Image (cartoon, rainbow, N blue to C red):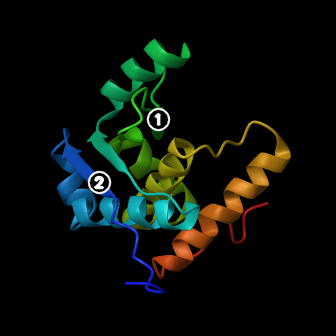
Amino acid sequence: MAGVRQAASPSEVAVMIEAPGWHAAVPRVERVARRAAQAALAEAGRTGAMTVLLSDDRALKRLNGGFRGKVKPTNVLSFPAEHPATLGGMALALGVVRREARIAGRRAHLHLAHLVAHGALHLVGHDHIDAGDARRMERAEARVMRRLGLPNPWRGVL
C-alpha cells in the first residue's frame, strides 16, 4: 500500500549453549542473549542473522589464541561473516563473564546482555580502537541497554 511503511524483519539470532553452566548462571539465558543481540541490531538500524555461542573459558582461550594471538580467555569474541547473507557470530566465556560481573558488582544477566550487545555492535561495524570510536561504541551500548530497560553499564565507570 502506498504510504504504508513495512516494518523491518526481525533479526534471526541463534543461541547455542556449549557450556551447560550458563543455565545456572543466567536464568532464561537464551532469551537474554537473543534480546540483547536484537536490541543492538535495532539500535544500529540493521537486520540479519547471527549466532551467539555461550561457551567456556577453555574454548575462548583457544579461539583467542588462534584468531588474535592472545593465549588467554576473554569475555566475548566477534566473528564478522564473510558471506553477505549473515552478520556473523560471537562467542562468550562463562567463567570470564561471571568473574567480571562479580568484580563489577553486577548480576551476571546484566553483564551478559551488555557483552552480547557489544559483540553484536562489532558485527555491524563498531569498534573501539581509538578513543573517539570507543566513546561512540559505549554510547551505543548504553542506548541498547536502555532499549532493554537495563542499567547503563558505563554509569559510574571512570
In this picture, is 78 found above or below 117?
above
For the residues labelled 1 and 2, the Cα–Cα distance comes to 16 Å
| SS label for mark 2 | strand
The residue located at (75%, 36%) in the rendering is 129
Residue 107: % across, % down: 42, 67
The residue located at (49%, 67%) in the rendering is 42
**Relative to 111, 69 lies left or right:** right
| SS label for mark 1 | strand
**Relative to 70, 139 lies left or right:** right
Q: Residue flagged by tag 2: what amino acid is it? A: Val
**Relative to 138, 41 lies left or right:** left
Q: Earlier in the sequence, mark 1 or mark 2?
A: 2
Q: Nearer the viewer, residue 93 or 31?
A: 31
The residue labelled by disc 1 is: 77
Quadrant that contains the C terminus: bottom right
Which of label 1 and label 2 is nearer to you?
A: 2
